[in-house]
Amino acid sequence: MNSWPRFCDGGFAVVLLLGWGAFTHWLAPPQNQGALISVVGADHREVWSTLGGLREAAAGLKWVQAYGAWRDRDDAELASHLAWVARLDPEPLVYWLNGARMLAFDVAVWRMQQEPKNANVIRQQQLQAGLAWLEIAATQHPERSAFPIEQAVLHWTVNRDVAAVEEALAAAQACADAPPFVVRLRAEMMRRDGRSQEALNLLQTERNRLTAEASPVELQVLDRRIAELEIQLGVSPQFLP
């Protein structure tokens, strides 16, 4: 009998993680990823600071063009438009999140259809392209947890890489805007990685950090996770659900 019935049966943690990925999912992909990243890496803030609101309008136009290139499965055109979108207006998170999905998922599918014998290699190449795009995003928005969470989604979707997912979620947890589910998912990844005691310590620390103003539902869920781990490890309960 699984000692984490509600948390793990049916992959509840995985469903929640992938649910994040579906939260804003749409649009396209690129192929010239080296050029894409080098263009975005320029100091766009100084170059475009004098254009004011025109930058946002131009970025919106480029995004529409990127969608057209995605629809046509034109990797090179999409790469060009995507790079310009991020260069013109790096503020909207959706550009970065969707860009990562374009690279990691859509381009991978296109390339694998063209080269089915190289599917595994292509899948890993596009995963790394998506992760690199999110690294750039994090330099623009270092305070936002959305990007390491998205990295966790990519790692799980492509490779089911428990250790990499946990590492990404640790980075997300360090952000001030991290949603409550991050710590619970991170603990679940630790448990799956054979680090149940660390998972318990993490949840207990989070429980002690929460104040009386925390959501009663959140407290109840956290207490239940802690109790289930304590049963698994055979330790005396600290919190009772």
Image (cartoon, rainbow, N blue to C red):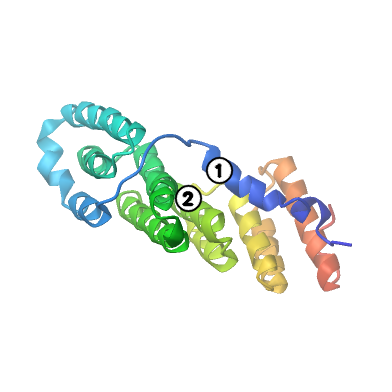
The structure residue drawn at horizontal position 19% and vertical position 32%, both measured from the top left corner, is 55
Label 2, secondary structure: give it: helix
Q: Quick one: 113 or 198, which is closer to the camera?
A: 113
**Amino acid on which the number 2 mark rests in the picture:** Glu
For residue 20, which numbered disc appears in the image? Answer: 1
User: Where is residue 232, by image quadrant?
Assistant: bottom right
Name the residue beneath numbered marker 2. Answer: 150
The first of marks 1 and 2 along the sequence is 1
Crowding at label 1, few (<14), some or many (≥20) Cα neighbours within 10 Å? some
Q: Is residue 65 above or below residue 216?
A: above
Residue farthest to the right, as pictured: 1
Q: Can you tell which quarter of the image residue 121 is in?
A: bottom left
Amino acid carrying mark 1 in the image: Trp
- Asked where in the image residue 81 lies, by quadrant, the reply is top left
Q: CA distance from mark 1 to mark 2?
A: 8 Å
Residue 180 shows in the view? no
Helix, strand or loop under label 1: helix
- Marker disc for residue 123: none
Q: Position of residue 142 (x, y in %)?
A: 36, 53
On screen, residue 130 versus residue 13, left or right, reads left
Q: Write the residue at 56% across / 46% down.
A: 179
Give how far across and how far down residue 139 sits, in percent. 31, 55
Position of residue 39 relative to residue 25, above or below, is: below
Q: Is residue 127 left or right of residue 92?
A: right
Residue 173 horizontal/vertical position (percent): 53, 56
Q: Check if mark 1's residue and mark 2's residue have beta carbons within 8 Å.
A: yes
Query: Compared to 88, does 199 lie above or below?
Result: below
Front in this rendered view, residue 104 or 238: 104
Q: Is residue 116 visible?
A: yes
